[in-house]
Amino acid sequence: FFSVLKRTEMLTVNVEELNYLAKRLESFDTGEAAQFQAMAHKLELFELKDLINLTFRCQQATVITDFSDLAAIGRDHYMNLHGGSASVDELNALDGKGTARQLIESGSGTITPYGVVFDNGMKLEQVYDGRFFPCYYYEPNVITVAVTSKAEPEGTEHITWLHLPMIQEEIDRAIRRASITDPKEIRLRLEDSQLPNEVDILLDMEYETLSDLNELAEATDGLSNVDMEKLGAVVMLAEPKSAAQIKNLVESLDLFDFAPGVHTPQDYGKYMIQQSGRFEYDENLDAFYDYEKYGTERMNAEDGMFTDRGYIAYKGYYSMEEAMNGGQSNHMVLGGLSR
């Protein structure tokens, strides 16, 4: 618990700011928590904007909570001065005790309830301007989108970061916070994605909508690595043109057969006979299997292709175009009669 935040209890606070600060602080280890609280106390900060900005700079400070191990204090101080890291050789060559004594004897420390803090020249810079939150990956997400207003230059720093999938109400609040009132004024940029590269290169952000991207992220959230590989191959076969079509393909993955790592008819025949589970493979008869012939025959009877990820084939009862455009649900309503 960050007791230094008690000073904000009687203040009127912004919910989005409080939520962002909580996410930042939740990721802090014990050392960072001490740095944050000690510097917040030293600087007498209570506004959420300042506290958020402090989370990006407090790691520069040194806080001593235990004076019994001077060598450890010296090592920690050295690392704080060098961006939080140092090589093994640097630390081995460091006179930790001497460094600690020099720091303590400098007299620049401030006593706080969280330890003696040395700011090391830290400046509270405006990373957060009070309106646009800096990009921060709190937990794994499928798609990260940078949202800006078309009224701003393309290189504007006034960016609203959306980590999809999100609840629609959260998206709406974020857009309102950016003072974008007309959906036509929204400019999108794909910043990061956990989707296959085949999907990323197909997404034309000039024509995509946040709702379609969010639905795609929701559909793919939780997919296994195997299914992500399969999706990459499916996209190569189906050639979708939009996030909405890709989302429909995700929901129809079971209509495709995927043989990962298969790149030749012989590989495909061997995969089907040995690994697909559709045949009782007998290794004693291996010399009698004509893998290439069987693989070629299956390929000639299928709607499939080789991709960099393996062989993919469509097995649906209706056209792949229908599946891509959401036709599966319409056919399902007929209770199988369409088959």
Image: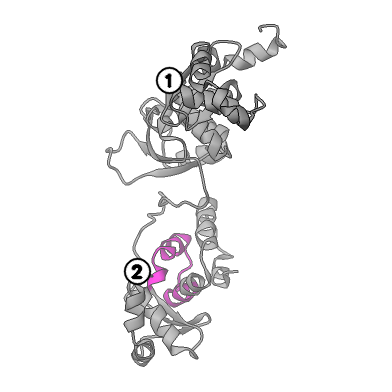
Drawn side of residue 270 relative to residue 119, left or right = right
Residue nearer the viewer, 193 or 47: 193
- x and y percentages locating residue 291 in the rendered image: 52, 22
Quadrant of image for the C terminus = top right
Residue to which mark 2 is pinned: 83
Percent coordinates x, y for residue 310 in the rendering:
46, 29
| Residue 33 colored in magenta in the image | no
Depth order, front residue of 189/317: 317
In what element is the residue under mark 1? loop
Disc 1 versus disc 2: distance between alpha carbons? 46 Å
**Up-down: is 321 above or below 258?**
above
Query: Mark 2 belongs to which amino acid?
Result: Gly
Other-residue count near label 1 (Cα within 10 Å), few / some / many at <14 / 14–19 / ≥20: some
288 is higher (above) or lower (below) than 123: above
Kind of residue sitting beneath label 1: Glu
Q: Chief secondary structure of the magenta span? A: helix
Q: Dot 2, crowdedness within 10 Å: few (<14), some or many (≥20)? A: few
Q: Tell me whether circle 1 and circle 2 mark residues in contact (CB < 8 Å).
A: no
Q: Nearer the viewer, mark 1 or mark 2?
A: 1
Q: Quadrant of residue 283?
A: top right
The span picked out in magenta is 37-60
Q: Which residue is mark 1?
A: 239
